Image (cartoon, grey):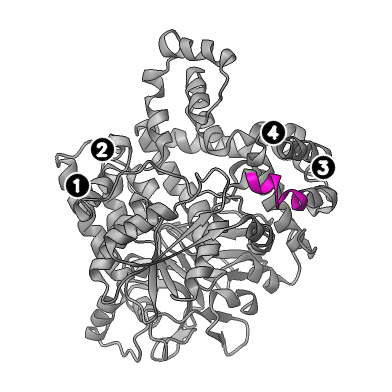
Amino acid sequence: MCKALHHRGPDEEGTYLSPNGDVALGARRLSIIDLEDGHQPRPNEDRTVWVAFNGEIYNHPAIRERLKGRGHVLQGLSDTEILPHLYEDYGEDLVHVVEGMFALAIWDSQRERLLLARDRFGEKPLFYVRRGKDLLFASELTALVDGLGAKPDIDPAALDAFFVLGYVPGAGSILEGVRQVPPGHLLVWDRASGALTERRYWSPPAPVTELKESPRELAAEAGRLLERSIRGRLIADVPLGVFLSGGVDSTVIAAIAARHSSKPLKTFTVGYEASDGTHDERTASREMAALIGSEHRDIAMSSEEAATRVPALLSTLDQPLADSAVVPLHSVAEFARDEVTVAIGGEGADELFGGYPRYSWLGRAPQSFGQNGGVGALVRNLVPRAKSTSPRFLRAFDLAVPRPIPERHLDWVTAGRRHERAGLYGPRLLGALAEDRVLADLERDFEESRSYSVPGSLMRLDQLYWLPDDVLVKADRAGMLASLEVRTPYLQRELAEFATSVAPSTHLAGGGKQLLRLLLSDLLPNAPRRRKVAFLPPIDEWLRGPLGALMESQIARGSLYSEGWVRADVASHLLGEHRRGEADRSPVLWPLLAGGLWLDRFRGVEPG
């Protein structure tokens, strides 16, 4: 199991085995804090409490001093060392004391209890499975499967959800019987009885009504909290840098980090060699780096690199992920790893500070595009005669057609893939259509937040699902596969709770992320304002070019098709339409490629 996690911790391996041999902890370490004396698993003074830990505790210096004042004896300087001592003082409530990203396991040999806990937003993964009274857990599915000895079956409902959403949602996994500790949750396992109890210890607060403070005052408070968060995330005994896209989120981080860095800040960007040039952020990032004064490096992904990187990466992920941005993120992580061991990213800003345009679009829909008359009738009359069907035009048309908001939201964020399933699915997946669990779960969660505004409900849903299950999975796996730690200052607890206490209408004013834009204007008055650009590679071009043959090979010989999950004839027809330029089928083909490559590796088949 430790060997399977070598990429997460290439510097050191450690194990603990209980005296009777029936409880074991293993840890792989990426050395960042206290390089010489940060060994794991870590015990308390009398070696009755043992900890295995993945992540970073950013407030560990202050906690260390408090523990010393209470009489605890600490030998080194690592953040891991504080955890067994915190457990002695607080028990499972230690999760309320620490600020950071973590998946941790604490074995209490006297009470014969194991505590598993995951950080508030789920930045670090933690999977587990029950086998009778026994419990196995690991940071990734690959390690967990190695511990089981026999591979579990694929969960058809999870595979269906993956195809629709592009990721596996919730507390389950792609494998039957294997679950995740949800974000902001802890589990306690009792050795004698085998009982397992779970409880939530934190969730994003609900949005409130308008605050009295002005947007400028709110932006100043956001800046104060963000600065504190970034200072904590700059603590490292190894080189550190920032991923800089040139957008608001990363530029704010880089500008603050540069002010608190004792050396010139290192920044990194990835772009693409695409024919239309719309996917390349290198020019914008260079301009921002010049304003900040950072030592900037950037690379461009070519189609040739995509042909090699895509199958290698997507097949290696422990769980399938169809967010195409994982490809360039892994590329820039590998590139940065030559110079740094830690990179700071801007994950969480869109979900907490209102960065997605769909929040405003869907929030205005009932007022601007009603069922009868006005703009709605005009759009419906124009569509049949339109020569161009841009995304904005199609969304305007969709808003003119009355539909429940959860259904409309799901189709917007997934390009309507769920409507392709009936014709595309093979016999092993058709049963999942009867439940249509993805839409049912979304409708349930949306109903629970009906007291919020529409934008507030959507922001909260993204904080609970899209952020941990896609965005943070992408950042964690892309970084860890390159043995690079990615830190996310926007997810600091106080900052996140402040952001969710601000009314969505305040966040969305001025085109979204109003507070961060105001903060950026104070930090860099000469910074140009740019429209939000999705960090997405040109997968439509790749599927017509270097990845077309790979997709064709998948359809002809891949496990996804030979096992009866997906119909090869329908997938082949979609690929033909795409390669001939008759339609852009990449929203459907990419999840099939990602899922197929993952399944082949899981089955032991060479990808491609």
Hey, what amino acid is under mark 3?
A: Ala
Above or below 529: residue 175? below
On whether residue 550 falls in the magenta region, the answer is yes
Q: On the picture, is 218 further left or further right than 314? A: left
Q: State which tag comes first along the sequence, 2 or 4.
A: 4
Give the residue at mark 4: 420
Q: State which tag comes first along the sequence, 3 or 4.
A: 4
Dot 4 lies on which element?
Answer: helix
Give the residue at mark 1: 218
Give the residue at mark 2: 506
In contact (CB < 8 Å): disc 2 and disc 1: yes
Q: Which residues are magenta?
A: 541-551
Q: Residues within 10 Å of mark 2 (few under 14, many from 20)?
A: many
Dot 2 lies on which element?
Answer: helix
423 or 292: nearer the viewer: 292
Dot 1 lies on which element?
Answer: helix
The answer for how far apart the CA atoms under marks 2 and 3 are is 48 Å
Quick check: can you spot residue 202? no
